[in-house]
Amino acid sequence: MTVYRQHEKPEDDVRNAVEQIAGEMQREFGFDYSWNQNRLHFQRIGVSGHIALNPGSVEVKIQKSFFIPVSDSHLKSKVEEYMDKYL
């Protein structure tokens, strides 16, 4: 699953916003996360992905095992909610 969001914010502001999004995902879903340059990687058992900071946009990619009890639509709507809140 992939979620894109356009923005016109400075890179530092977007990086801080993505850090806030990752914190929300950690609290809600138990993800661990770490940065590798302009990409924040997150994971937990059965779910992994990244949030990429691109000029003018943010891309969230999530891979989820079929056996994880969280639905794709719920996970996507939560990511969109966090993006609306922080971006």
Image: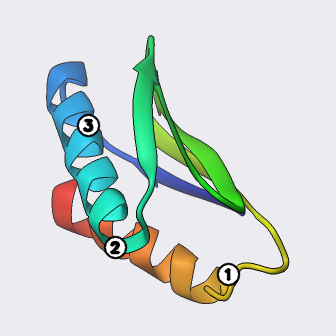
Among the 4 quarters of the image, the one containing residue 13: top left
Residue at image position (33%, 49%) is 22
Residue pointed to by mark 1: 72
Q: Locate residue 26 relative to residue 16 in the image: left or right.
A: right
Q: CA distance from mark 1 to mark 2?
A: 15 Å
Residue at image position (18%, 24%) is 10
Mark 3 nearby-residue class (10 Å; few <14, some 14–19, many ≥20) = few
Mark 1 nearby-residue class (10 Å; few <14, some 14–19, many ≥20) = some
Amino acid type indicated by mark 3: Glu
Q: Locate residue 41 relative to residue 16 in the image: left or right.
A: right
**Is residue 2 in view from this perspective?**
yes
**Is residue 55 in view from this perspective?**
no
Amino acid type indicated by mark 2: Glu
Q: Going from the N terminus, do you reach mark 1 or mark 2 first?
A: 2
Q: Going from the N terminus, do you reach mark 3 or mark 1 first?
A: 3
Residue pointed to by mark 3: 8
Q: Tell me the quadrant of the picture where the N terminus can be found.
A: bottom right
In the picture, the disc for residue 28 is 2
User: Is there a contact, CB below 8 Å, between mark 2 and mark 3?
Assistant: no
Q: Going from the N terminus, do you reach mark 2 or mark 3 first?
A: 3
Amino acid type indicated by mark 1: Asp
Percent x, y of residue 66: 85, 77
Mark 2 nearby-residue class (10 Å; few <14, some 14–19, many ≥20) = few
Among the 4 quarters of the image, the one containing residue 46: bottom right
Q: CA distance from mark 2 to mark 3?
A: 27 Å
Q: Locate residue 36 relative to residue 72 in the image: left or right.
A: left
User: Is disc 3 placed on a helix, strand or loop?
Assistant: loop
Q: CA distance from mark 3 to mark 1?
A: 28 Å
Q: Locate residue 81 relative to residue 6 in the image: left or right.
A: left
User: Is disc 1 placed on a helix, strand or loop?
Assistant: helix
Q: Furthest-front residue in view? A: 45
